Image: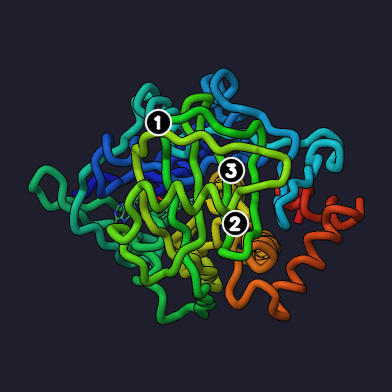
Amino acid sequence: MSPRTHVGIVGAGPAGLVLSQLLDRAGIESIVLEDRSREHVEKRVRAGVLEQGTVDLLEAIGVGERMRREGIVHHGLELRFRRRGHRVPLSELTGGRAITIYGQQEVVKDLIDARLAAGQVLLFDVDDVSVHDFDSDHPRIRFTHAGEPQEIGCDVIAGCDGFHGVCRPAIEKHLKVHNHEYPFAWLGILAQVPPSTDELIYANHDRGFALHSLRSPELSRLYIQCDPRDDISAWPDERIWEEMHIRFETDDGWTLNEGPLIEKGITPMRSFVVEPMQRGRLYLAGDAAHIVPATGAKGLNLALHDVRLLAEALTGWYRNGDTSLLDGYSAACLRRVWRVQHFSWWMTSMLHRIGAPDDFEAQLQYAQLEYVCSSVAAATTLAENYVGLEKV
Ligand SMILES: Cc1cc2nc3c(=O)[nH]c(=O)nc-3n(C[C@H](O)[C@H](O)[C@H](O)COP(=O)(O)OP(=O)(O)OC[C@H]3O[C@@H](n4cnc5c(N)ncnc54)[C@H](O)[C@@H]3O)c2cc1C
């Protein structure tokens, strides 16, 4: 007999871990399987901008204590172009809503601690995960753990295993795939240096986009647009800083602090969506179903929105046998997925340079940037999407 659980969750990223926490609070059992080590997932530096709704959700599931203490709340952001900065007052334009800067790896650490403290099953370092019989009422997950082949029987499988996982490929032939690759990538660095700014700076420069973000009062996170074919070895630290100085330069003497790099890497920019996000008893959530270009800072936030809907749907089903929310899961998620895809594409198109500095596209970008910085209506559109729309 294989062990049974209600929900088998593949992947201990933000989506899988928050889902397990939501289910636990609703009295629904789950087992989480993760193919990397605990140390690896707790150190993986990725997103860091939490929407207001994400903060509220993490608070509600009991993992908000450290985020409240260490997270940095931002009420605005800066758009920088033609050597001048323009503040978008996010909170003023959205009735007091804000974003919180708190690294994804910290969110993941808090969630792992909560799961293990509650005595719930979370297996790291599993291999050869495969999903089976999700077209029946008795789905199964097979995997190897500590060298032993194992199998779990469950009512439902949640595919929270990210873009390179196994769940989406298992059903991909039944799905419509939308894939849009951008002709640029982001070179991201994490630097041991106090941020040179109190709020995020999104810069449109003739040489390409740059973003100044942060992770803590001692850690800066910065990005520059680069060629997706670039090898990171072509970017020694001095070249990165030199390029950052150029792209952030202003006429008012603003300076950029430099410090030792802790990490650097190149991430391609893509928009990707599969429809529907479910097949039989297999439900996809987060990056397993969609990828957004990072300019909108939405990937993590969108992943958590999916699992909130999935947990609500599963709760309805276990409580009173009502399948309506489960049946409508994909359609409900995709409404927000496409809104967020559009916002992320819009931010990306407005800020990245593809052609010459004075070509048609560049002039359109400046026209759009000037509009956002001079019209309350246009600025509000950016602000309400950036802090996260309450309802979509
Ligand atoms: C390199 C990178 C950099 C990013 N940077 C930013 C950023 O700067 N800003 C931003 O807003 N967003 C960023 N994102 C996006 C954001 O981090 C993701 O949207 C977010 O992690 C989605 O969460 P998730 O739980 O859906 O997927 P993931 O975080 O990818 O979690 C999936 C989990 O499943 C595990 N897994 C995979 N395959 C298997 C398997 N076969 N069996 C078991 N487990 C498996 C993985 O190890 C992982 O732990 C970045 C993403 C990447 C990949």
User: Could you say which is closer to the camera, residue 17 or residue 208?
Assistant: 208
Residue located 71% across and 49% down the image: 386
Query: Disc 3 versus disc 1: distance between alpha carbons?
Result: 30 Å
Residue carrying label 1: 109
The answer to which of marks 3 and 1 sits earlier in the sequence is 1
For the point 52% across and 73% down, the residue is 182
Q: Nearer the viewer, residue 357 or 326?
A: 357
Left or right of 112 on screen, residue 271: right
Whichever of labels 2 and 1 marks the residue nearer the N terminus, that label is 1
Gap between marks 3 and 2, in whole Å?
40 Å
- What quarter of the picture does the C terminus occupy? bottom right
For the residue marked with disc 2, what is the amino acid?
Thr
Asked whether the beta carbons under mark 3 and mark 1 sit within 8 Å of each other, the answer is no
Task: Give the left or right position of residue 209, taking residue 74 as reference.
Answer: left
Pointer 2 residue? 295
Look at label 3 and name its amino acid.
Arg
Which residue does the numbered mark 3 point to in the structure image? 319
Q: Secondary structure at mark 1?
A: helix
**Dot 2 surroundings within 10 Å: few (below 14), some, or many (20 or more)?**
many
Q: Position of residue 123 (x, y in %)?
A: 26, 40
Amino acid type, mark 1: Lys
| Residue plotted at (46% across, 36% down) | 258
